Amino acid sequence: MKYTASELTIFTKHIFTACGMNEADAALAADVLVAADMRGIDSHGVARLSGYVRLHQAKRAKMNPEWKIIHQTPSTATIDADQGLGLTVAPKAMEIAINKAKQVGTGWVAIQNSNHFGIAAYHAMMALEHNMIGIAMTNASPLVAPTFSKERLLGTNPMCYVFPAGKHQPVVVDMATSSAANGKLEIAQRTGKPIPLGWVQDKEGNDTTDPFALSKGGALLPLGSAHDAAGHKGYGLAAVVDIFSAVLSGANYGPWVPPFVAFLDPLNNLPGKGIGHFVGAMRVDAFRPYEEFIAHMDNWIARFKSASTTTHNERVIIPGEPEFMQYEIRKKEGIELNEKVLDDLMKLGHEMQITFPS
Amino acid sequence: MKYTASELTIFTKHIFTACGMNEADAALAADVLVAADMRGIDSHGVARLSGYVRLHQAKRAKMNPEWKIIHQTPSTATIDADQGLGLTVAPKAMEIAINKAKQVGTGWVAIQNSNHFGIAAYHAMMALEHNMIGIAMTNASPLVAPTFSKERLLGTNPMCYVFPAGKHQPVVVDMATSSAANGKLEIAQRTGKPIPLGWVQDKEGNDTTDPFALSKGGALLPLGSAHDAAGHKGYGLAAVVDIFSAVLSGANYGPWVPPFVAFLDPLNNLPGKGIGHFVGAMRVDAFRPYEEFIAHMDNWIARFKSASTTTHNERVIIPGEPEFMQYEIRKKEGIELNEKVLDDLMKLGHEMQITFPS
């Protein structure tokens, strides 16, 4: 079954308002979620809608948080999200960053006491319409083992950098700092096929090709893991995201990041509040004239696109290009939901008395 | 043969002054280079000294550049390094970033028209004595093939993030965005042993274990390369570094970055000037009180250090820890130079009439 962005957005918005969220925030949260589906990041779209509702029902997320700026300078701010959803607080933090960048060239906002913020690219891409570079990162529930650790101490901690271009699409680097995304693991689980070495370790910390090793007490591995001693780089990047998002903001970090799933309780004696995000906006013309920058971005992109290639693909791909292509395809053809997600949404609609589009 | 930091610093300083560099800059450049040797980053220390001299002799680097700020806002600046060495201009750019951070919370400086800046960590770590977070990155001569490319279009483009801590050493993430550092490749070349898959591709773009494939027209691979489709992450990170360092500053990017070695000429029709760097400083107390931050950094570090481990190592390592350990060892025992480097330095000393310490 395929659905239009509009159908899924309306349904999602109604679910959030049924939870008591105000109209404007519900529209925003729905927009963030469906943007993920439109960009082909199915794991972060409406597939997660019931997860946010369960957090609300478990009283771990507030629908109408009284978020506030608790500290600021001309180029920085720290926000207490008051247990709101990152879906709605992160775009507001990004607006603050953009406004600071308008004033002093760059703006940087750390957010504590939040919940999952959807795809990082949504927030970072807000910078584009202001001719700015956008940055967004977040920490997440611990699933990743640092190099040499048996324990899961880090999330998949994505970092996202967005650079405007001229006639080409912007460059959008949006990546988990783990070796494999959870979504890829799920596909392997469905087919039962062995996974490549370097994605996951078993509970003893040994390399494994078992697609179910994570649910048996194993851990995801950091980016670079299969290489002799390059896994420490992915671990380092995940640490950078954790420290910016949480140690700097006052949120929980490392193993203390509260789980996204409401059926798992947070640990005791937490060192911070909720999960943390970090966003930034940099005015391009705070460094060089905007027209010059985008002309060179176009030159950069054109040169990479025209590189002579290996036999593995007919062309070098620009970071972010696959997502822009998915967006165009899904705008025409709609968004296909898999059976499990569809079933989950229909049950959710039934429970909240919101009609799922048919 | 082992040498003290002081012996190597004095020799290096004299070589630079013999090239006509002013005293203060020569002392600074020597300090940056020997800091690499002290931290165990042998590939970026005095081993590169003759390389800088050859660039000077080829009239591609100026010893006393008239660098200047060509654009600025309260939190940003762009510097034209006037073909100076990154060794001396990057610390000055970092000072500007630190001063801007003092004023408005953060400071960010893009540098064009520069040459190799040594180890990124030297510049980023300057933030520490000001209770700031430090960031440094640089692009570099093209040696890395983006995913699916046969051509080398990116450098090993390192990124460095430095976070102050309290009783523990700071967290220092300083990493090339390629899978393997050139230094590791050189070790494999000396022994002639096959290298792991995922480090290098041959000139057709195929995986190879040949340690000499790079010199036969192959390319280094981006971080994550050996994993099914995770190499695009390392490519994305290298792109981020290239864009910040060069597209934003007005330097050369991608395949146009001039080679470090003076015996290779830059390409024609360059789109920018020299190579580019990007540095930043963020006041911790622009986000939360400094004492709170370092207490939580200590907690983060202690938790990671005490994680239960796999059989591969007795303890989880904190990013930057091995370099602080090397520093302590070399402070006591001195810096060992390998035969090739020693020979190169002695020849250089003879040529410039500077006595090498014996």
Image (tube, coloured by chain):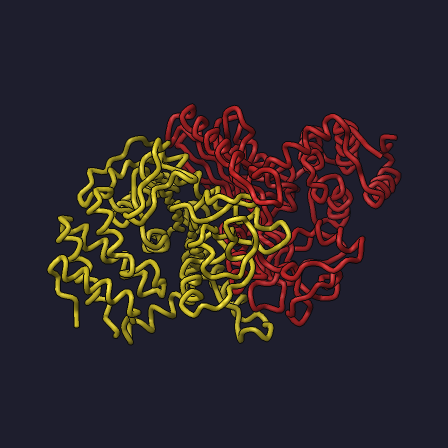
Chain colours: A red, B yellow
Viewer-proximal residue, B294 or B263? B263
State whether residue A312 is above or below residue A171.
Answer: below
Quarter of the image where the C terminus of chain A is located? top right
State whether residue A198 is above or below residue B3.
Answer: above
Residue found 37% across the figure and 41% down from its top: B257
Quadrant of res A253:
bottom right
A7 on left or right of A298:
right
Q: Visible in this render: residue A148?
A: yes
B110 on left or right of A20:
left
Count of marks overlaid on the render: 0
Viewer-proximal residue, A136 or B327? B327
Residue found 49% across the figure and 64% down from its top: B301
Position of residue A270 measured from the top left corner of the image (x, y, whole percent): 60, 60
State whether residue A78 is above or below residue A229.
Answer: above
A165 on left or right of B17:
right
Quarter of the image where the N terminus of chain A is located? top right
Position of residue A43 measured from the top left corner of the image (x, y, whole percent): 71, 44
Position of residue B130 measured from the top left corner of the image (x, y, whole percent): 33, 52
Position of residue A140 measured from the top left corner of the image (x, y, whole percent): 62, 52
Quadrant of res B168:
bottom left
